[in-house]
Amino acid sequence: MSAKPKYRSVTMKAELIGPCGINCALCSGYQRTKNTCPGCLSEEAGPSYCRECSIKLCGKKISPEELCIECEDYPCRRLKQLEKRYREKYGETIFDSMQTIKKEGMAVFIEEEQKKWTCTCGSLLCVHKDLCPQCNTKNPHFIGTKKTGTAESIL
């Protein structure tokens, strides 16, 4: 009897891009099979840090899905803090993500992300893990040193 996998196979889609530019499909909270996060824009209940996200709930946005780059206050203090954390911890820049979406469109951004983050086994890699959640191949985009492919913490 084989053990149930800890991570599910996921597909990137526009609905998984948060207003801040973070790609929820690359998050271990979204990819795991237990206590799964549905993505920050989902109607389903997710972790409190996603439900109560001050960026997602910002009163200056017309809708929760609106990208922060469209705001007259872009980049605000909260977004700058998030950018710094993601750049330092994960080597990702949400500002570049939003610029690509604005200039090239969501479809191009998703296509580029899909190419970049697809493991040789065909599964999506996780921005928070050093190993592919499906085959344990080294994640070439992972820059962290403390979190391992088996860690459950995402932030």
Image (tube, rainbow, N blue to C red):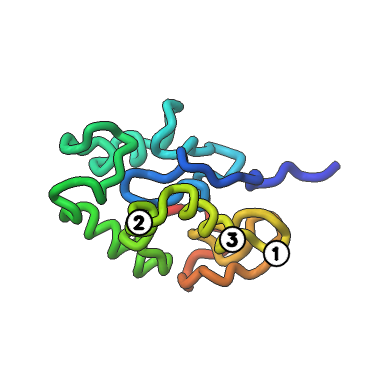
Q: Secondary structure at mark 2?
A: helix
Residue 76 visible in the current orientation? yes
Pointer 3 residue: 115
Pointer 1 residue: 120
Nearer to us in this view, 116 or 138: 116
Nearer to us in this view, 14 or 93: 14
Please name the residue shown 57% across and 60% down the image: 117
Question: Nearer the N terminus, badge 3 or badge 2?
Answer: 2
Going by the numbered disc 3, the residue's amino acid type is Lys
Please name the residue shown 64% across and 56% down the image: 133
Does residue 27 appear to the left or right of 20 in the view shown? Answer: right
Pointer 2 residue: 103
**Image location of residue 91, percent across then percent down:** 41, 69
Q: Quadrant of residue 130?
A: bottom right
Q: Secondary structure at mark 3?
A: helix
> Residue lying farthest front?
104
Nearer to us in this view, 43 or 72: 72
Going by the numbered disc 1, the residue's amino acid type is Thr
Please name the residue shown 46% across and 38% down the image: 15
Please name the residue shown 34% across and 34% down the image: 51
Kindly report the distance in space between the C-alpha atoms of the residues bearing marks 3 and 2.
Answer: 19 Å
Frontmost of labels 2 and 1 is 2
